[in-house]
Image (cartoon, helix red, strand yellow):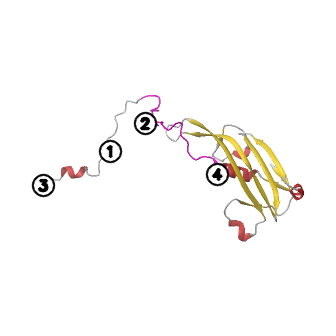
Amino acid sequence: MKVSLAALDRGEVQLREQIAPDDPMWQGAGVDLAAPLDVELAARSVGEGVFVRGRLRTTVRLACRRCLTSVDNVLDEEVDFFFEPLTEEDEEAEGEVYPLPARGDELDLAEAVREQLLLRAPEFALCSEECRGLCPQCGTDLNTGECECVPEQAESPWGALKNVKFD
């Protein structure tokens, strides 16, 4: 996913690409794509930097935070980020600013796209609002049936007062 810097000098560059869920760029990302990532970006020169705006579309597979079943979550997000030449003082710049390579004739957008997807992917998912989750004692999925466990009675912080005798 590269953009020619020479082409950017002549005007806006459109980029449309599809990245497979098993692409090496997702290794170690902690996200499971259920569908290819559709990338539609437009890059243009702005001053000494490059401004990129577009849309990312895919389906992210997550585990329900209550019962751990797989949940597919559609992700359709607009993104924009900026590449600029950074000095040593700017290296800790916050926000969506990426370093523009000092040399070279291409700008690689892969790492920025990966980061943008990871920032926008939901952290948690629910299979449904009515999800009852798993039994904390035996692990039975309570959505599919009841378990045989006896519910634990939580000890009351005031329980010790029951033993106090007043004369």
State whether the magenta stretch is mostly helix, strand or loop: loop
Start-end of magenta stretch: 119-145
The label number, if any, that marks residue 119 in the structure image: 4
Say left or right for 25 vs 158: right
N-terminal of the pair, mark 1 or mark 3, is 1
- Badge nearest the viewer, 4 or 2: 4
Q: What residue is disc 3 on?
A: 166
In the rendered structure, does residue 161 fall within the stretch colored magenta?
no
Q: Kindly indicate whether the residue at mark 2 contacts the one at mark 3 (C-beta within 8 angstroms).
A: no
x then y, percent, for residue 105:
87, 57
Q: Is residue 40 above or below residue 43?
A: above
Q: Nearer the viewer, residue 152 or 48?
A: 48
Separation of disc 4 and disc 3 at Cα? 61 Å
- Residue 157: x %, y % from top left: 29, 52
**Dot label at residue 154:** 1
Give the residue pinned by disc 2.
135
Q: Is residue 130 magenta?
A: yes
Whether pointer 1 and pointer 3 mark residues with C-beta atoms closer than 8 Å, the reply is no
Q: Which of the two labelled residues, at mark 2 and mark 1, occupies the earlier sequence position?
A: 2
